[in-house]
Each structure stands twice: as structure tokens, then as C-alpha cells.
Amino acid sequence: SPNSIDLAEDRERWNAVCSQLEIPQPPGGTAVSLEEALSIVERVGYPVLIRPSYVLGGRAMSIVYDDEQLNEAMKELTQQGSLGREGGLSAERPVLIDRFLEDATEVDVDAISDGKDVYVAGIMQHIEEAGIHSGDSACCLPPVSIKDNILKQLKIQTRKLALALKVKGFLNIQYAIKKDEVFVIEVNPRASR
């Protein structure tokens, strides 16, 4: 439903869901200005993953390592780039800034739910480290080097998230695994591929 999509996209609502379900996510926040972005980075530290909210396909996503790169990324999102021409950022369309988990393994989980039960159709492991968009990444299905206890954890978290979002249909979730800890990156209550 549109509410499920908004629940997955709206940062405050999403943080509340993850907190309630006790599912870790990288620390971060939302910003509509460079000053707000710098404040978030001061709290979470570099590197950060910066991306606009409410867009499909990883569009305009950047990994930022310093204030100069952050300034350039925010300019692209607010003024010069296609997102700027589309209205830029606002309280309704902020930029998402999350601590980037370097040397993490990224995983895509595709599932289907009827609102009562959840079936995990596939767990796809990215070959490159986290940060390469799924559409551009070399991946393998089934995963080849993820421990059984982590695979079990991915299935449990996917089930919890699907039911919390009241998904009836397809669901795609991106996770990052760093030092045997699983972090949810984002949920798309829709088919991924």
C-alpha cells in the first residue's frame, strides 16, 4: 500500500520500525541543507552514504569521505543536477545520510508475503564490497560465503520487516554484513528484479 511504501521511505517512521523490531541500521539522519548534512556527519563520522529519498534504482547515490565531497554532493542534489531541476530537496524530500560501512558485504533478500506469512525466495550476495548499486554489482545466488547463522538472521529480519510493513506481494531488502553483524540498509516493498 502507499502507507507501506511511505513507512519504508520516511526516515523517522522507518527508524521507529527498526527500533521497535530491534533491527540494527547504520546511524544517520536526513538533511535539506549543507549545514544539516554537516551536523549529521559530525555525529556519525565519515565516510557516509548520501542519497535522495523517494527515488528508484540508487539514483544520485554517493559515498562521501570529506567535507568538500559532501558540499559537492549536496550541490548536485539541490541545485545543479537533475534532482535540483525536479524541485530539489525539501522537508518532504530530504537527502538521506548514513554512516557507510566500509569493507561490509552487501546482500539483497527477495521475499513474498501474503500479510500473514513470508517466503524468502532468494538471498543474493554481492561480490564487491557494499556501496556498488545492485544493478551494477556482480552478485551470486545462492550466497557462497555467508555463515549459516547469518543467513538465518537475514530470514528472521526479513520476516519481521515484511509483517511490520504489512506487505502483500513482493519485498526486496538490502542488508550489509560487517564483522558478523547484520544491518538493514533499506527496504523496498515491491519487486526488485
Image (cartoon, rainbow, N blue to C red):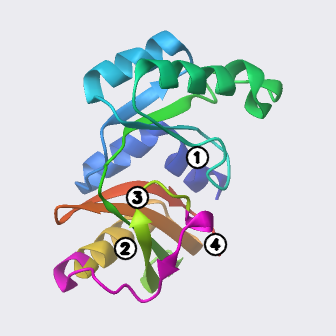
Q: How many marks?
A: 4
* Residue identified by numbered label 2: 159
Side of 157 where 84 appears, left or right: right
Q: Nearer the viewer, residue 96 or 130?
A: 130
Q: Quadrant of residue 123?
A: bottom left
Label whose residue precedes the other's in the sequence (1 or 2): 1
The amino acid at mark 1 is Asp
Give the secondary structure at mark 2.
helix
Give the secondary structure at mark 1.
helix
Residue 185 vs 31, above or below: the answer is below
Q: CA distance from mark 3 to mark 1?
A: 25 Å
Is the residue marked by circle 2 packed among few (<14), some (14-19), or many (20+) residues within 10 Å?
some
- Dot in front, 3 or 4: 3
* Residue identified by numbered label 3: 130
The amino acid at mark 3 is Ala
Residue 151 vs 20, above or below: the answer is below
* Residue identified by numbered label 1: 6
- Dot in front, 3 or 1: 3
Residue depicted at 42% across the width and 73% down the height: 127
The percent coordinates of residue 192 (x first, y second) are 62, 70
**What number is the disc on residue 56?**
none
Reply yes or no: does residue 139 show up in magenta. Answer: yes
